[in-house]
Image: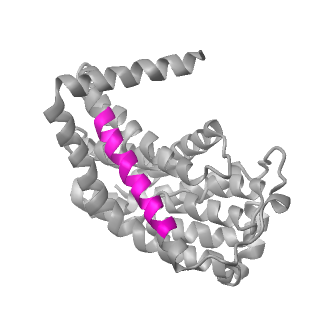
Amino acid sequence: MKKHNVLMSILVVYILLSMIIFPQLYIQKTLDGISVWAFNVLPCILPFVFFTKILSITGVTHKLSSPFQKPCKTLFKTPPISSYVFLMSAISGYPLGAKLTADLYQSGQISKSDAFKMLSFCSTSGPMFIIGAVGIGMLKNQIYGYLIFISHIIGALLNGLLYRNLKAKNDKQTESFIADTKTDLADIVYDSLTSVLSIGVIISIFFVVIASFQPIFNILPEPLLPIAEGVIEITKGCLDVSTIIKGIWQPLICTFLISFGGISTILQSLTMLTKLKMPTKLFILQKLTHAILASLICALLCLIML
């Protein structure tokens, strides 16, 4: 039995035992996760998933992105349609960028190498979460919200430059996939439903995971608590930043956590990328470099503006 399978089994047994001992706590944490998904994530992501799926299968996306062909080729070495994916991801947030990239790959419109490069800058959070939920709702500071969002987006673009020469092994996508021309409304509805439900399941599960690690988190120095929780689930991490961290450290830490995405968001994206077979280590590395670059941009903006 592989070592990582043993560790995973031990972790799962530990969580299951904790749930048996403290059932009421874990029921409440599951409900908290469902509530976050239903009231914060679902209204933002569902309409975008549905309508962007329609655009993806009609081929209109190529026309919308054609003016950006040269900039994308020059800067990121990606097809023009990547500008459309970046825009939609920047507007709607996680994990739509991954979903659109996977749809384009499955329909034969981009290669695997294109998809890998696109994910380095097309996997972003959106203004409704960053400015609205985090800046105004949690940190009670709209300026912080804008600083985090600007840093996050610039960091994504710089990250795209970092991976512009990335190539996938055995990239035979154009031979393996044919554009889907028979997708009907029922298929789009089903695809949208399964996508958003999978996101809800992952969010709820990670609220439970955070609760199971609470005894460990409680021994950490207080400033490290929101970072530890945010690396697992960004909503919970940013919420703790608002109550534990003070001053300009708030936007800096939130920028890092949101740009990294947390294990919960990374898994949401990876569920969308199953058929693409995106290496988990590569995707995590891309999110980590995005987080570092965005945090440096945020630090620079804070020095200039605050």
x and y percentages locating residue 236 in the rendered image: 29, 44
x and y percentages locating residue 187 in the rendered image: 54, 72
Q: Quadrant of the C terminus?
A: bottom left
Residue 231 showing in the rendered view: yes
Q: Is residue 72 above or below residue 297?
A: below
Q: Which residue is situated farthest in the left direction here? A: 24
Compare residues 127 and 111 and report the one nearer the observer: 111
* Left or right: residue 222 compared with residue 95: left
Which residue lies at the image location 42% right of the left edge and 18% below the top edge? 10
Among the 4 quarters of the image, the one containing residue 279: top right
* Residue extent of the magenta highlight: 190-209
Among the 4 quarters of the image, the one containing residue 104: bottom right
Residue 220 showing in the rendered view: no
Compare residues 27 and 78 and report the one nearer the observer: 27
**Residue 204 colored in magenta in the image:** yes
Which residue lies at the image location 21% right of the left edge and 25% below the top edge? 20
**Taken as a whole, is the magenta stretch helix, strand or loop?**
helix
**What scheme was used to colour the molecule?**
one colour
Q: Quadrant of the N terminus?
A: top right
x and y percentages locating residue 160 in the rendered image: 66, 55
Q: How many marks?
A: 0
x and y percentages locating residue 292 in the rendered image: 53, 42
Q: Is residue 100 above or below residue 210?
A: below
Among the 4 quarters of the image, the one containing residue 173: bottom right
Q: Is residue 235 above or below residue 231?
A: below
**Residue 236 colored in magenta in the image:** no
* Left or right: residue 263 compared with residue 73: left
* Left or right: residue 20 compared with residue 190: left
Compare residues 116 and 237 and report the one nearer the observer: 116
Compare residues 48 and 137 and report the one nearer the observer: 48
